[in-house]
Amino acid sequence: MGVLLPILLALLAALIGGLYLLGVFRQRRPGEPPLDKGRIPWLGHVLEFRRDTLKFLERMKQQHGDVFTVQLGGFYFTFLQDPLSFGTFTKESREKLDFNKFARHLVRQVFGYVSTGDDHHMLQISSNKHLKGDGLEAMTQAMTSNLQNLMLHNIGSAADQRTWVEDGLFMYCYNIVFRAGYLALYGNVPPRSAGGEENAKAEDRAESDALFSEFRKYDQLFPSLAYGVLPPRQKMEADRLKSFFWDSLAVHKVRNRDNIGGWVFDLQRALTEKGVEDSMIDRYMFLLLWASQGNTGPSAFWLLLFLMKHPDAMTAVREEVEKVLKESGQEIRRGGPLIDLTREMLMKTPILDSAVEETLRLTAAPLLTRAVMQDMTLKLVDGREYLIRKGDRMSVFPYSAVQLDPEIHPDPHSFKYDRFLNPDGTKKTDFYKGGKKVKYYNMPWGAGVSMCPGRFFATNELKQFVYLMLAYFEFELKNPEEKIPQIDFKRWGFGTMQPVTDVQFRYRLKY
Ligand code: HEM
C-alpha cells in the first residue's frame, strides 16, 4: 500500500490535469456569455462546425442568442453575431483582441512561413501604395494586358472565330482570372530571354497554366489543411505542392522577370532588408499568391453565372459597358486594336459595381477571428456587457449575421443586381436593422486590422474580366434551365465559396 498510494495519487492527478486540459471543468462564470462545450471533450463542436459552419452557428444563435461561447478543438470561441455591435470587435485595441497572434499560427501551419517581425505593418504600407488609389493605375494596365493575352491570343488566327467553345464556367473563370492576376503581380517572361515578344507571351500562357493546375490541387486540400486534419497521403501531397510553389515563386526567379508588380517587389525588398533569408521569403511569396488569387476567380464565376441567370441584370450591365466603351472613343473591330481598358473607365460603372457587391454578399463568407490577449468586457450597443477570458478567441461570421439577414437585405437569398444602387444611380450605403443604420452591411473583405488590403484591386480584376467578356464574346449557358449549383459547405470561413459542381457554358468571339 505504501508504494501503491503515491502511484494512484499521481495517476489521479494526471487524470484530473488531463481532463482540465480537455476543458472538462470549465464553467460559465457570472457575466460571461452562454457556454456550450459540446459533448466531446476538447473537440467540443468542431465536427459539426466543420461540416456546416453556417448551420451550426444558426443553431447556436437560436439556442443562446447573438453572443455565445463554444468549444472548438481545444479553444473556446466567443461568437458575436449582433451586426450593430460589430464595431466593438473590429475596433477593439490590439492589446485586447489581436489578429496577428492567430494569423501567425495559421500561416505557419498552412504555408510554412515563420513570421519574425511586424509583417502586417509592412504589408499595409505596400498595399496602400500599390493596391489602391493611384497605385492601381499600373496594376489595372498590367491586368488588362495579361487578360487580353490569355483571352484573346488567338484573335486573327486562322481558326474559325465564330465557332462555339464549350467549357466549365467555374474552371474557365478561375483559370483566366488566376493566371492574369498572377502575371500582373509576379511579372512576365522577358522577351529577351524567350526570343521575342510573341514567344514570351506564349511562355506566360503556358507557365501560368501549369501553375494554376497545381494551385487548384492545393486549393482543394486547403480547408482540411487549415483545420490540421489532412490524412497522411494528402499531407504528403500538400508538402509536395508547397515545395513546388516555393520553388516556382523563388525570389531569384521572380527577380529575373519583367513588369513585376510594385506590391510583390516592395514586399520582397522589405523582407530582404529586414534580413529574412531568401528561402523564407519564397514561402511568403506563396502566401501572397494564395491570398491574392484564391478568391477572385471563384468570385468571377459567381458574378458571370448570376448575370447569365438574370437577363435583366445582364442587359443593364451590358448597356453600361457599351456606353463606357463608346464614351472612351474606342470601338471593337475585327482586326482592329485591342481596347485600352483604363482605371478611369472602370470608375464609371455603378451598375457593375452593385452587381459585384451583390455577388460577394451572396458568396463571400470569411470567418474573422482574434486572439483574446487579456480579460476584457465586451460592450454591445444595446447596453449588454459580457466578460471574455484571456486565452480564448473571438469571432464574427458576417455571412449569417449580416449578409443573409432578411431585415438588412430583404429577400436575402435572391440575387438583385441593383441592391447596392440608389434610385438616382449612386452607390447605396444606407441599410437598417431595427430602425438603426447598419455600418457593416456587407463584409466580404472582413473589417478592422485584417480587412483585405487587395479589395480595390480585386474589384477591378472582377470588373475587367466581366468587361472583356461582354465586350469581346457572346456566351451562354449550355442548358439555360440549369439551376445555380449549391455552395460547397467545406469552405465556410475561408473567403469566397466554391460550387459543388461546375456549370457548362459556351462562348465565341463576337467579331
Ligand atoms: C474577391 C476577392 C477577394 C476576397 C473576397 C478577399 C477577402 C479577404 C478577407 C475576408 C480577408 C481577411 C481575412 C481575415 O480577417 O482573417 C483578406 C485578407 C487578405 N487579402 Fe483578400 N480577398 C480578395 C482578393 C484579394 C486580392 C486580389 C489580394 C491582393 C492582391 C488580397 C490580399 C489579401 C491579403 C494580403 C490579406 C491578408 C491581410 C492581413 O494579413 O492583414 N486579397 N481577403
Image (cartoon, rainbow, N blue to C red):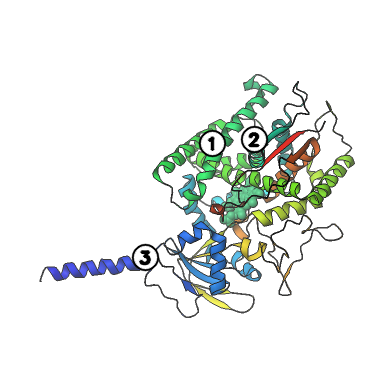
Q: Which residue is mark 2?
A: 183
Q: Is residue 205 visible?
A: yes
Of circles 1 and 2, which is in front?
1
Examine the rendered structure and indicate whether residue 208 appears above or below residue 466: above
Q: Residue at x 63, y 39 (%)?
A: 171
Mark 3 residue element: loop
Quadrant in the picture for residue 137:
top right
Give whichever of 378, 50 is nearer the camera. 50
Dot 2 lies on which element? helix
Location of residue 177 in the rendering, given as x and y in whole percent from the top left corner:
67, 40
The first of marks 3 and 2 along the sequence is: 3
Q: Residues within 10 Å of mark 2 (few under 14, many from 20)?
A: many
Figure label count: 3
User: For mark 1, what is the residue?
Assistant: 214
Residue 260 locus on image (x, y percent) = 64, 35
Q: Is mark 2 within 8 Å of ligand 1?
A: no
**Depth check, front residue: 112 or 415:** 415
